[in-house]
Structures are given as structure tokens and as C-alpha cells.
Image (cartoon, rainbow, N blue to C red):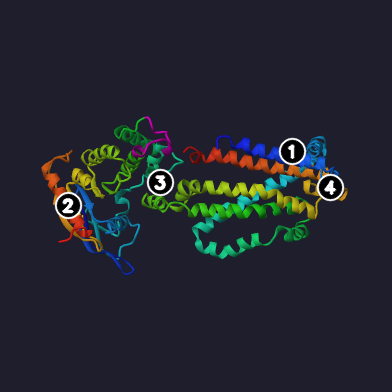
Amino acid sequence: MKYPAVYSTAAVLLFLFLWEAACRYYQVQDFILPVPSRILTVAITRAALLAPHAGVTALEVIIGILISLAVAVPLAVIMFAHPSVEKALAPFLVASQAVPVFAIAPLLVVWLGYGMASKVLMAAIIIFFPITVNLLQGFKNCDPEYRVLFQLMGADFRQSLRLLLWPWALPHFFAGLKVGVAVATIGAVIGEWVGAQQGLGYLMIQFNARLQTDLVFAAILWLSAMGMTLWFIVGWLEKKIVRWKFER
Amino acid sequence: MLRIVNLTKHFDDLIILEKFNLTVPSDGFTVLIGPSGCGKSTLFDLLTGVVPKDSGEIVWEQRRMNHLGRNAAYMQQKDLLLPWFSLLENALLPARISKTDMVKSEIKARKLFRRLGLAGFENYHPAKISGGMRQRCALVRTLMFDYELVLLDEPLSALDAITRRSLQALLLMLQSDFRKTILMITHDIEEALLLADELIVLTPAPMRIRKRFALTSPKPRRMNDPFLVELKERMLELLQEDAGLIIR
């Protein structure tokens, strides 16, 4: 496909057009389902209200990503270097995903309070799994012939990690990170729903209670924009760092 | 001189090598040829220490050792260049890992690049060049090890006929100009006849020496040499017999 962006843009525009047309034709009230043009207008005109809260949510997500990276990368390396550690930690890793974040959100608020910490941790928990699992898989996918080559060159584990395993696993790492950042906002917003005084999740609860559905959608639009921006930043970084993957 | 004495390797009930003996003279070009699965590559794995031997001796320059380790450079069928490094960086990997003087190593690598017709491509990445050039770069990396003994496991088998011929000339240069002792595995009888000082035909597993041929005619050789043509026929017969293709 030569111009994939054209197709995706056309699909989005068609969806929005059908939404707008259906709402206007059936005269759906704004508090039930506002038209896209109204949502866009509100998202822009009420930017002064939404932006500071979006900033708080964005900060929670970014700190969550950084914490996830700080834990997931060394953990994946340790699990790869010591398969016994992987076997020991596997049930915890799976459990961390099997338990719905909705279930632990109230507990985190109780433990860490109504401030930013509980939301950051929620985001971190969501991102942590795809990064760890993808990175570990990337290390494992390294062609054994290359590993033998490094063994014959007398490389120690650190040299193999730096020169072979890490670059080899980078495409997997970025695949995990893309998934992570795309869903990171979920963790932060759920945390804000449960108990917060700031953030887009907090605003959504407030607007929803007042039947200001257009503002709820505007907040969702801002959240979507945030998630997509993060996704594109990671994609851009991937193209810069994993250049060889795109050179073929 | 490399001496292999009573080398034995079993994989469970499968006997790959049983008291295998071989002598490879210094500065010589010895070629091993045998049916698929006879254990040629396992022999190299044992020599390099990738796989541990069950019993037997490996003697290099009158020193007994478990495996050749850092006494032999090993070049495989795949070029095994790292796509994230330039050709020069790939060639410098052995120096980087063994922490030798990088300035001197780079001067040496650049000389080898010129010698092997890769000058001007030092900063190219492997994805941007042909298979033949990649294999030449792998040869530079092999030479960067600076070991007297070079093990070649079908290094040219993945290349087209014309590229293969030009690289055969480079392999001869490896022997004549760099004074290397070469032990090569190939499936290509003509290649073996063009390059070898001694040609060893192997039996199916458990691998034994079926026949040795000394080739004293000067190099470079041509395949229209009547002696080589006759020898090729005899070797084909030997190999077909082992493969059960000749019914007597």
C-alpha cells in the first residue's frame, strides 16, 4: 500500500461523517451522544480547562513509563541471564496481568493516597508487562549462530548484551513499548476515577455527574490525542534507533 | 600442525564420531568433503568448543587442548554480520571484544578492506551491499582474529557461481599471502579440487576418513585439467556409493 495514511484518514473521516449524520438525522440530544463537530468545538474552546488536567494525566503516564522501563529492562535481562529467575517470576508476571487493574485501583489509592503516586503506579503496572515480555522474547529470539560467533570471539555476557542481544531485542522492545504507551492512559485514568483531585479521569467523573457528555467526550479526545502522540513518539524513536530494520 | 586423535562424540545413541583421527599440516589447505549429516559440522563444533567432546585429543602446534578456543578463526556459511553496525565496525568486532588497540586494528582492517576489494564501503551497512561483499567482510573479520588456523564451514555455499569464483581466489590468497592453515568443509567437489592441497573424503556417520587425495598441481587451477576431471569422477563415485546411488 503506497499511502496508508490516506486510507486510515479516509476511514476516520467517513466514521465521523456517519456519526454526525446519524445524530443529526435522529436528533440525538447532546447529553446522550454529542455530534463530533460539537465535541471538537468543546475540546478546543474549553482547552483552558482541559489542558492543565491533561498535563497532570500526561505526567502520570510519563512517570509510569519511566518507572516501568527502569524495572522491566533490568528484570528482562536478569530473567534471560538466569532462567531459574524467569521460572520463579513467571507466575507473578502473569498474575500482574490476570488481575484487572480496576480491582487493584482502590487498594492503590488506599495505600498511596489520592495524589499522583497511585495513578503513576497504575500506569506503570499496565506498561510493565508488555515491555518485559517482549524484551525477554527479543533476547531469546537472538539467532544461536550469532551467539556462537560471540562465544568464539571470547565475548563475556556484558559484551554480548551490549553488542548483540540488546540491539537484537530492540525491535521487540519497541513493539512492547508501543503497546505499553497506547494503554498507559488507561491505568492513569482508572486511578483518577477511583480517587483524585486532578487529571482528565477526574474531570470525566465530574462532567459525567453533570450530564456534560460533550465535555466527557472532549476529555476522551484529549486522552486519545495523548495516547497517539506517545505512540508516534515511540514510533519515531524506533525509526531513529532501530534504523537497520527500516533500511532493507 | 593440527592433530585430532581418537575424537569421539555421541548424541545419546547416535554415534557421530568414533575415534576420529585427522592431521592438518601447517600452511596447508585441507578440504573435507562428505555426505550430508556425516558429522563435518559437529567436528568443527567440537574443535571450536561449541559442543564438548566425549573423548579424544586435539593437539595444535604440539599443545594439547580441550578445544581450539582462541587459536582458530571460524567462518560459517552465513556471513553473520550484525545489521546495526557498519562493515568496518563488524570487522572490528573481534578487536573490540578482545580489547586490543582499536587504532592499530582499524588500520589493519582498512588495509584488509582494500585487499579484499571493499575499499570505500567501510561505512556501509550490511543491508546495503551484495551477498558476496558481505561474505568478503566476514572474511575480513575472520582475518582480524589474527589466528594461524582458519576453519571454514561451507563459507561460499550461499553465493552465486560468479561471486563464488572470485571469493575462491580470496581464499587462496588467505593461504598464500597470509600463511594461514586452512581446514574447510564443502559440498562442492569442484571447489574442493580448485582449492585443496589435500582432499579428504569422509564416510557417513560415524564419520571416518574414506579416502585422502593429495593435490600437488599449482594454483590457481582450472577444472579442464585432465587430472582434476578424473579425480572429480572418482570422488563423485565415492560419494554416490555412500549415498546408495550406485547399485553394484
Number of other residues with Cα within 10 Å of mark 2, as a class: few under 14, some 14 to 19, many 20 or more: many
The answer as to whether the residues below labels 2 and 1 share one chain is no
Q: According to the image, label 1 marks what residue?
A: A17
Number of other residues with Cα within 10 Å of mark 4, as a class: few under 14, some 14 to 19, many 20 or more: few
The answer as to whether the residues below labels 2 and 3 share one chain is yes
Number of other residues with Cα within 10 Å of mark 3, as a class: few under 14, some 14 to 19, many 20 or more: some
What mark, if any, has residue B235 been given in the picture?
A: 2
Marked residue nearer the N-terminal end (4 or 1)? 1
Q: Which residues are magenta?
A: B120-133
Proximity of marks 2 and 4: CB atoms separated by less than 8 Å: no
Residue B227 percent location from the top left of the image: 11, 45
Gap in angstroms between the C-alphas marked 3 and 1: 60 Å
Identify the image quadrant of residue A125. bottom right
Proximity of marks 4 and 3: CB atoms separated by less than 8 Å: no
Is there any visible trace of residue A114 in the rendered image? no
Foreground pick, A140 / A179: A179
Marks 2, 1: nearer the viewer: 1
Foreground pick, B156 / A233: B156
Q: According to the image, label 4 marks what residue?
A: A32
Marks 2, 4: nearer the viewer: 4
What mark, if any, has residue B97 been given in the picture?
A: 3
Q: Is residue A248 magenta?
A: no
